[in-house]
Image (spheres, coloured by chain):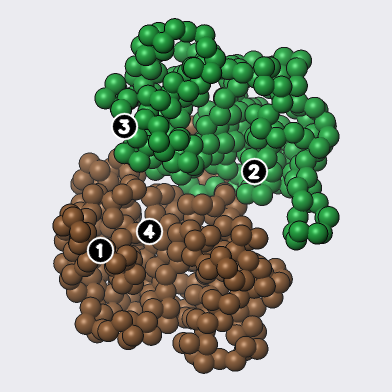
Amino acid sequence: MNSLEVSNLQIWDRHTGRVIVPDSSFRVKQGSCLALVGESGSGKSLTCKAIMRLNKAGLSQSGDIVLDGSPLSQLSEKEMRAIRGKRLCMIMQNGMRAFDPSCVVGVPIRETLSRHFGWSRDEIAARMAEAMTSVMLRDPIGIMNRYPHELSGGMLQRIMIALAIVLEPDIVIADEPTTALDTIAQFETIEQLIRLRARTGCSMIVVSHDMAVVRRVADDMVVMKDGVIVEAGPVRKLQSDARHEYTRRLLGAKLALQQHFQAVMGGDSFVDRNRR
Amino acid sequence: MLIVTGVDQSYKEGGLWTGTRRQVLSSIGFEWKQGECLGIIGESGSGKSTLGRLLLGIERPDRGSILWEGRPITDRKARAGAISAVFQNYTSSINPFYTVEQALMEPLKLLRKNRREDNRSAIDRLLHQVGLDSSYRGRYVHELSGGEAQRVCLARAVSTEPRCIVLDEALSSLDGSVQMQILELLKSLRTVYDTGYIFITHDIQAAVYLCDRVMIMRNGRIEEIVATGDLKETQSPYTRKLLEMILA
């Protein structure tokens, strides 16, 4: 059972009383991938952090978040800590900011794994090395002894995915996993996410404003605008007949680019590959 | 006309006392013709941003020469008003203590071409050209959205009517629909001012949309330079790999 249900989630700023997300409800079905789409400032990242209960102190939230039938909102901070990482794992948007800049990347990895599993140093190194090799990071031990600023954004993103592979969480939340990456790193990261889901059977929430990414990984999609969910449904269905004008605009945003590209490349040989 | 010949660049690496240097660019050579739009494509770490800084004259290459109209680009007088830049990080590209008006005034003041009143009317025109209106004059950067801030940067870049604008990942941190708007804006500005662009990006689709020629970079070297129309017949295996990895 890897399902997550969010109902009547409300997020507001405690100081100004401004409501950022008024009333969100959605469901991540077992083993499926849900995409949260919308333009910047539409509350996608806040929603994800609210699920993890990681929003800043100035933000309050209410509503029910139910993981496999057990409500998370009633858990104490300590109980929540045990769930974070082990059952709900978040892959952060900005690799550079997600890791502690003052220590090598191996340190937080070791802390996380020894806390959740109580493994020894050697065991952690062995398991991480295996996972890191599987996400095409060469020289895993060397990488774990480097500082975040010595690694590229794509490498840090892959380290987080490797950590998720070792943790085998029920739900993986990936917040804009590919925005900072170039074409090749983006392609590989997306492939890794797909393989992660196939391997661990986890459910997934992917936040993105890139419709190409959404089409590739997600089964269902939730469209957010200014904190409000304007439309939800299977990606395939929304792709062909979106009811809301905003969804159509999002889907069509880069259509001109793609059409021009296809015209230049002469036919759809390059596109076919991804539509399979 | 910008002529780059045999440019090498390296940076010091690692600790305080180790003298090892990492080669970032090696034997780069190409020509940028007046009014042309040249795309520079590469993975992160391929040296494209370093090349961008060298083209702007902000840094000096270890070896080789970059000539603008026959004069070295590092000479301030040679490049004044002729080449300008738009960077990826729009929030840190504008002085946070400046209003939009002050930010746009800065390059005009430095050129000292016009009288003050002319500059004021020029600002309205510039804002209008990038799809903003005069009400933005008094605003600060933090009051703008990403797309608006990037438009201000673009307005600032075209304010001196340069012949070349270097766009270093100028669209990468914007939303899809905003990216499209800025791309269209760049296309229209090109016809108005007859400026050329050097468009540094990792988004191949955007580069193909805007550019006449693209230069593919890999590990600090030029893999190849092709006209966009000939991209589908490219022989380079690396370019083919790049093209195949585009998510559509």
Q: Disc 2 and disc 4: Cα gap in Å?
A: 25 Å
Q: Earlier in the sequence, mark 1 or mark 4?
A: 1
Frontmost of labels 1 and 3 is 3
Question: Which residue has dot 1 on it?
Answer: A59
The amino acid on which the numbered mark 2 sits, given as a three-letter code, is Gly
Q: Compared to A260, does B78 lie above or below?
A: above
The amino acid on which the numbered mark 4 sits, given as a three-letter code, is Val
From the rendered image, report the letter of the chain displayed in brown.
A
Residue A238 position, x and y percent, is 28, 51
In the drawing, what numbered circle is on residue B42? 2
Does residue A229 appear in the picture of this structure? no
Label 1, secondary structure: give it. Answer: strand
Please tell me if label 1 and label 3 are on a single chain.
no
Q: Disc 3 and disc 2: Cα gap in Å?
A: 36 Å
Please tell me if label 1 and label 4 are on a single chain.
yes
Frontmost of labels 1 and 4 is 1
Q: Compared to B66, does A206 lie above or below?
A: below
Q: Are marks 2 and 4 in contact (CB under 8 Å)?
A: no
